[in-house]
Amino acid sequence: MSRKIQINLSELDHTRSCRIIDEYKDTKYLIVGKWGLVSDTFSVYSLTGDVLAEVRQQSLGVTPRFDLFCFNQFVGSSVLHFSMHYTTLFINGINWLVVGNQEKQSYIITHGRQKIASIKSYAQADQVIRLLNVENIEHEPMVALISAILNHPSLVHTSKLKLPSLDKYPKGANPQWGECHFLKK
């Protein structure tokens, strides 16, 4: 069963925590953490306070390495490659491939030919909102962490993002959800 969830990247950058909400604005998870030093982490918590998934920064530099954990079990390490406009992130262990455009902040996560999730970023007022369309609800915490990795300062920082270059919600569309379609009158 697929579901759409949302992360406010601007809030995550400024407060180091953010609610992950669904399309009905119900809180599903809480993501907390920071980047910068080796062993810094981001964690996804359930509403009951349990740690569902965690990503730890293992190295510094232009292409930092991250280790991902789910229910305190190691699931894989990231191998990051990026070029002028495109990013490729491979998660060893679970064999997930993340491919996307840095300028448009749009990504697809796959496992072989199976689509795991799509990630799109939108500008709303002075905030950057990231919508995650996850095919399997069990994968949501891991996809949220991958979304946090894609927001790592070595890749792109929301304060440096050009908000005019991101898609804007069209007039008449729900500013929180939807596929940015125009409402018929």
Image (cartoon, rainbow, N blue to C red):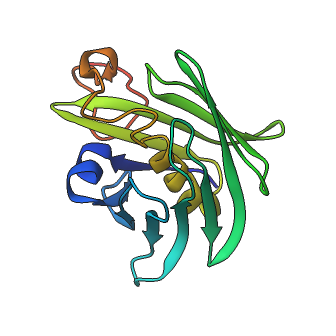
Where 68 falls versus 60 (above or below)?
A: below
Q: Is residue 180 left or right of residue 135?
A: left
Q: Give the image location of residue 36, x and y in percent.
A: 38, 53
Q: x and y percent of residue 111 in the render?
A: 78, 44
Q: Position of residue 74 (x, y in %)?
A: 70, 70
Q: Residue 175 versus residue 32: which sits nearer the camera?
A: 32
- Name the residue rendered at 40%, 32% in the picture: 156
Nearer to the camera, 165 or 33: 33
Q: Would you identify the image quadrant in which residue 121 lies?
A: top left
Q: Position of residue 137 (x, y in %)?
A: 60, 60
Residue at screen point 49% across, 78% down: 51
Locate residue 151: give its quadrant. top left
Up the image or down, 124 lies above or below 53; here it is above
Q: Residue furthest left?
A: 125
Which image quarter is the N terminus in?
bottom right
Left-right relation of 9 to 133 = left
Q: Residue at x 38, y 23 (%)?
A: 181
Looking at the rendered image, the quarter that the C terminus falls into is top left
Left or right of 57: which side holds 97? Answer: right
- Residue at horizontal 79%, vertical 49%? 95
Total marks in image:
0
Most extreme residue toward the right is: 112
Q: Nearer the viewer, residue 65 or 27?
A: 65
Residue 167 lies, with reference to residue 154, above or below; the image says above
Q: Is residue 94 left or right of residue 162?
A: right
